[in-house]
Image (tube, helix red, strand yellow):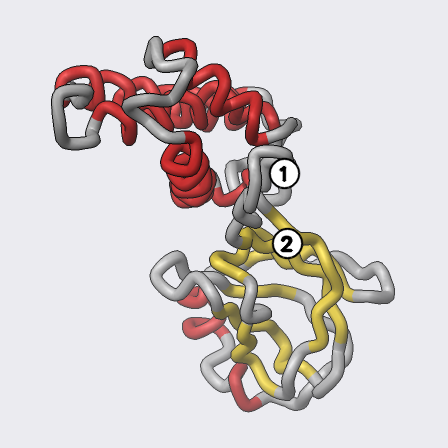
Amino acid sequence: MKAKIILDRAGVLLVDQTNINWPRPELLGWLNDGQREVVIHRPDSCTRNEDMALVAGTKQQLPAAALKLIEVVRNSDGHAITPTARRTLDANKRDWHVMAASSTILHYVFDLRDPQRFYVYPPAAAGTKVEVIYSTAPKDCESEDADLGISEVYANVLTDYVLYRAFSKPGEAGSPAAAASYYQTFTNALSGKTAVDQMFAPGQQPGQGQ
């Protein structure tokens, strides 16, 4: 979907199709802000799935473009990798950080408080490759003719976000009440999608390979 479609929808709802109160470049900037805001709420809205070469040891750093790890899927040879809790390893394998290196990873450990790093068990031999899924920042729409940086399924929430920012603009055209209403609609839609996705996940816990 092109950015222009979102801007046209916003212009109609603002009753400002000629863009007197809200110039198109402003709306486009808010659209780009909205895409990044969506990713904050829904990291799965903009992801990459790729092979990653590990460094030697347990501690691993995601690529520079990554915002948050979503899942470590498998070794490059196809052997599955499953998540585990660090406290489990700490309690049962206290020396797991200094064990012999391996080119086959069995488990990974992830902490939401450290979203761009994860640990692997056993320690990786340098160059071991695993398949990872991580969230990344969406590409800005540099013009109205550019494609959205996230799926068009988020078109409605992006429209709501643009309207929220538009009505937040100081001056006679602004309306704090309307801005608050559109932002509430934006966040409600995202939280509702999260609940539905979890409900219909194919027999999996959220974040465990759905």
Q: Which residue is mark 2?
A: 133
* Label 2: how many Cα within 10 Å (few below 14, some 14–19, many 20+): many
Instruction: Point out residue 176 in the picture as x, y percentages from the top left corner.
Output: 13, 22
Relative height, residue 139 to residue 50 (above, below): above
Instruction: Point out residue 95 in the picture as x, y percentages from the top left corner.
Output: 50, 86
Q: Is residue 91 visible?
A: yes
Tell which of 157 and 103 is nearer to you.
157
SS label for mark 2: strand
| Left or right position of 107 against 175 | right
Residue in view at x 54 percent, y 54 percent? 136
Tell which of 66 and 144 is nearer to you.
144
Residue type beneath disc 1 = Ala
- In this rendering, which labeled residue sits more in front, label 1 or label 2? 1
Residue in view at x 47 percent, y 66 percent? 116
Q: Tags 1 and 2 in contact by the CB under 8 Å rule?
A: no
Instruction: Point out residue 202 in the picture as x, y percentages from the top left corner.
Output: 65, 27
Q: Is residue 38 visible?
A: no
Instruction: Point out residue 151 in the picture as x, y percentages from the top left corner.
Output: 61, 32
* Label 1: how many Cα within 10 Å (few below 14, some 14–19, many 20+): some
Residue type beneath disc 2 = Ile
Tell which of 185 and 3 is nearer to you.
3
| Left or right position of 199 against 30 | right
Quadrant location, the C terminus: top right
Residue in view at x 57 percent, y 49 percent? 139
| Left or right position of 48 against 93 | right
Q: Quadrant of residue 65?
A: bottom right
Relative height, residue 12 to residue 106 (above, below): above
Tell which of 49 and 118 is nearer to you.
49
Residue in view at x 14 percent, y 17 percent? 177
Q: Quadrant of residue 90?
A: bottom left
Q: Which residue is mark 1?
A: 146
Q: Earlier in the sequence, mark 1 or mark 2?
A: 2
